[in-house]
Image (tube, rainbow, N blue to C red):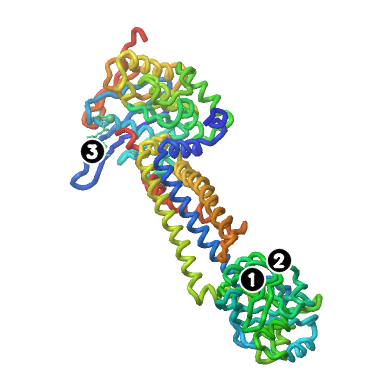
Amino acid sequence: MSAVLALEQIGVVYGQGATAFTALQDISLEIEAGEMTLLLGPSGSGKTSLLQIMGCLLRPTRGRVHLFGNPLASGLAVEAMAALRLAHVGFVFQHYNLFPTLKAWENVAIALDIKAVPRSSQRQLALALLERLGLGDRAEHYPSELSGGQKQRVAIARALAGKPRILLADEPTAALDGKTGQSVAATLHGLARDEGVAVVVVSHDPRVEPFGDRVLHLEDGRLVGDRRPQRSSV
Amino acid sequence: MTEPYAARVSGTSLLAWRNLSHDRARFVVTLVGVLFAVLLMGVELGLLLGFARTTSGLVDHTAADLWITPAGTTNVDIAGRLDERRRFEALAVPGVASVDMLMMQFAFWRKPDGGTESVSMVGFNLASGQGRPWNLVEGRVEDLQQDDAVIIDQLYAGKLGVTALGQTVEINNHRARVVGFTQGIRTFTQSPYVFATHRNAQRFTFFRPDQTTYLLVRLQAGADAAGVRAALQARLGRVDVWFAADFARAAQRYWLITTGAGSALLLAALLGLVVGIVIVGQTLYATTVDRLPEYATLRAMGAPNRYLHRVILKQAAISAVFGFSGGMLLVALVVAASAGSTVAVAMPLGLVGVLALLTLCMCALGALVSIRRITRIDPTSVFQ
Ligand SMILES: Nc1ncnc2c1ncn2[C@@H]1O[C@H](COP(=O)(O)OP(=O)(O)OP(=O)(O)O)[C@@H](O)[C@H]1O
Ligand SMILES: [Mg+2]
């Protein structure tokens, strides 16, 4: 199977001149569909930066990104990157980033709306996604009326709207208690296994680790580990 | 908002509406700002139009194609005199169907209880009716045949000391009797129009029987108006020959520009526009800054900039629609109140359209600052 995402000698430097800071250095790796990849490393090691490179949010200072085998132009315009994100990438954030004035289903419908899904089917699709994440009875609630785990599930439903091939999550369980975090991690893993989505999760959470099909280790902006743990039970 | 409705509106409309309605205090400030801007613009522009219509009212209400005026005339209220023989010269020009005399002269009006006001005597040809008063609400134009008969407007009845039909007054020391009232014939000079037959008006104002002020020309069907006008000008020499519409516009220009009333009103309307832009800009920007993380999230999700712009513009549009509706309601009250006063606020549909457009522009301009701000938004900020 060809890689969904391939990074080729990626380097990221923030700032210029005296204040220049190298956040990522010479990162080459491939992300496969149907796998949940964990991205581990100490604080400041460049995990979020790498996730942003994968998600077409950040342009690498050096190196090349390949999406479905096609190299992205190095000077890709901001709007072109947005269009790539829209078409292929779903994001899940540590703090959910739901729209507080929209109900759960409306949060999901917005993602469909941006993707120009016809208005008449937005509600149906949004409700179906929420149902799939076990939130069928929470569709009419506002984010402020949901628990942390429920919010993160709404966020995952929103990220899945429009069927992206890549799902990127930055510390999705950090704000959740252990059991809830574990079930969110299981959900993400299920998406990779059952739907063939390429899932990449940045996490410090030991309860997430067992769900990784593959574990990448970053240190000081370098890739220092890439292993596939033998799975026993998930 | 009910669910079926929310299911039908677009995402940008939904976000726009929720952004506004979840920040009610600020929304109210926005609406009040738009409302007062609309009120200010509406009243000032309505006054401007009302004054313009007043200054050219007499011209607009005749059916003449051409006006022959004493040379150098700038407006219908102030003019020199023409000899009656000019009328026969004009009648001799091919293409001319008829020529009527219209007299206009300031005069002194002595009220029944004493006290004097200045008035504008209008003398017209009763037979042709060119220059006759319009909107008569009491009496008949034909009653003007009597030697001392005049018609005035109800709006000025109080000023002229008249309370009922049949009352007698003095015009330039001649006895005069009010035989009719019109409704809404205003004058910009504040010397009310007093209508009489041409002959009576001559007598009231000491015009010689062979003198008049204007000649109103009607053309034969199919006549070349520009050609006849040139021929009249050549034939009559020291007079001005106008198309009626041009003469009307000249009167408007004269009064609104020479008195400074026009620029004062326009300036006040502009002020309303600027105040509106500033208030809408301020409140919209504050709302936008509050919601920057949400805009960054949309951007991270891959929404193009125009999607974000649409949310902001729709907020502006919603503010415009509600503010405009409220503002126009107040404007309508002012218009209604002005109907019974000597100063009219005109509000034809066209002006309502112009105001609607101005309101939309105002809100769109107010939205510009917010749009600039979210265009520069960094989607990676969602990870911080
Ligand atoms: N926009 C930026 N400008 C300058 N430096 C930045 C920027 N973003 C990140 N950095 C720096 O780059 C390095 C890597 O940051 P990054 O956020 O990728 O780390 P991380 O592994 O996600 O850390 P954490 O676990 O704390 O989230 C850090 O030292 C950080 O200070
Ligand atoms: Mg991070």
For label 1, the SS is helix
Tags 2 and 3 on a common chain: no
Residue tagged 2: B136
Q: Distance between the residues labelled 2 and 1?
A: 15 Å
Q: In this view, does A108 lie above or below A62?
A: above
Label 3 neighbour load within 10 Å: few <14, some 14-19, many 20+: some
Quick one: B351 or A130, which is closer to the camera? B351
For the residues tagged 1 and 3, is the chain the same?
no
Which image quarter holds the C terminus of chain B?
top left
Query: How many numbered discs, if any?
Result: 3
Side of A117 relative to B58 (left or right): left
Report the chain holding disc 1.
B
Q: Quadrant of ligand 1?
A: top left
Identify which residue, B259 or B281, lies in the foreground.
Answer: B259
Chain at numbered mark 3:
A
> Does the closest atom of ligand 1 sit within 8 Å of the Cβ of label 1?
no
Mark number for residue B57?
Answer: 1
Residue B53 visible here: no
Given the image, on which type of amino acid does mark 2 rest?
Answer: Leu
The residue positioned 39% from the left and 21% from the top of the image is: A146
Residue farthest to the front, as pictured: B113
- The answer to whether one can see residue B327 in this image is yes
What type is the residue that disc 1 sits on?
Gly
Percent of width and height locating residue B223: 79, 78
Return the disc, 2 or 1, that comes first in the chain's sequence.
1
Foreground residue among B59 and A226: B59
Residue beneath the point at 35% across and 42% down:
B289
Same subunit: marks 2 and 1: yes
- Badge 2 density bin: few <14, some 14–19, many ≥20, Cα 10 Å: some
Label 3 belongs to which residue?
A: A22
